[in-house]
Amino acid sequence: MTTPSSSTSAWRPGMPGGDTFPSGPAGHPSPPSGDGSGPGLGPPTVTIGSYPDYPSAQRVVDYLADNRFPVEHTAIVGTNLTLVETVLGRMTTGRAALVGAGSGAWFGLFIGLLFGIFTAGNWIAVVLAGLVIGAIWGAVFGAVTHAMTGGRRDFTSASSLRAGQYAVIVDQQYAEQARQLLGRMHMPAPEHQRG
């Protein structure tokens, strides 16, 4: 019969002397902190108000800062996140080539300027050549890349995250002070949450 070579490999839940968690990297028990949903990120926090938009939450934190509240103990947390992909327009092979030409032109301009610095002759010609060659290669690359999608994504879009609510949270030890300050603020009452 073999015996385990280390205390970590011998640990089992409920063993005496090991609490209920195996040793962490430093040899000390490393139980989860907070609500158990992830690693602890600092001291306990309290939500002092929830607001329907970011400017309202920002106005609250700004008010706290104006009244000498230690805002380094404050955070704005967006909840109920939604991914919104806004369609900007139809993408054709010609448009893909045009977008690629623009990107390639910028890269070509950069390379042309880099080589132009070390050119003894006409440096403007080197910069223009880099710009033109970059635009041509960018257009070719953009058109080929779009053609390879086989029509599966014939549109351009921009993605953004939007929150349904913005909660203002503070460290628990400063919660009462923050609530007192907010009581003097002339703003529609937030949806207070207990924490």
Image: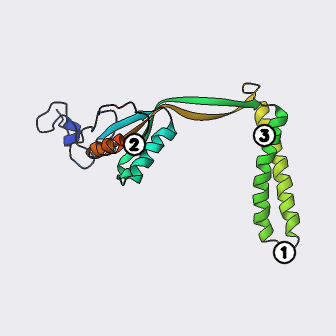
Identify residue for label 3. Answer: 142
Q: Amino acid at mark 2?
A: Met
In this rendered view, identify the residue nearer to me: 81 or 164.
164
Identify residue for label 1. Answer: 120
The residue positioned 42% from the left and 48% from the top of the image is: 63
Mark 1 or 2, nearer chain start: 1
Residue that sits furthest to the left in the current view: 16
The residue positioned 43% from the left and 43% from the top of the image is: 60
Q: Secondary structure at mark 3?
A: helix
Q: Dots 1 and 2: beta carbons under 8 Å?
A: no
Q: Is residue 98 visible?
A: yes
Left or right of 195, for residue 150: right
Mark 3 or 2, nearer chain start: 3
Measured in 3D between alpha carbons, the distance from the residue under mark 1 to the one under mark 3, in whole angstroms, is 34 Å
Above or below, comparing residue 135 to residue 14 in the picture: below
Left or right of 3, for residue 153: right
Q: Amino acid at mark 1?
A: Ala
Measured in 3D between alpha carbons, the distance from the residue under mark 3 to the one under mark 2, in whole angstroms, is 54 Å
Q: Where's residue 117, x and y in %?
A: 77, 70
- Judged by depth in the image, the label closer to the viewer, 3 or 2, is 2
Please identify the quadrant where the C terminus is shown.
Answer: top left
- Judged by depth in the image, the label closer to the viewer, 1 or 2, is 2
The residue positioned 19% from the left and 32% from the top of the image is: 12
In this rendered view, identify the residue nearer to me: 158 or 175.
175
The residue positioned 22% from the left and 38% from the top of the image is: 22
Q: Secondary structure at mark 1?
A: loop
The mark found on residue 145 in the picture is: none
Q: Where's residue 153, x and y in %?
A: 72, 27
Left or right of 19, for residue 159: right
Identify residue for label 2. Answer: 185
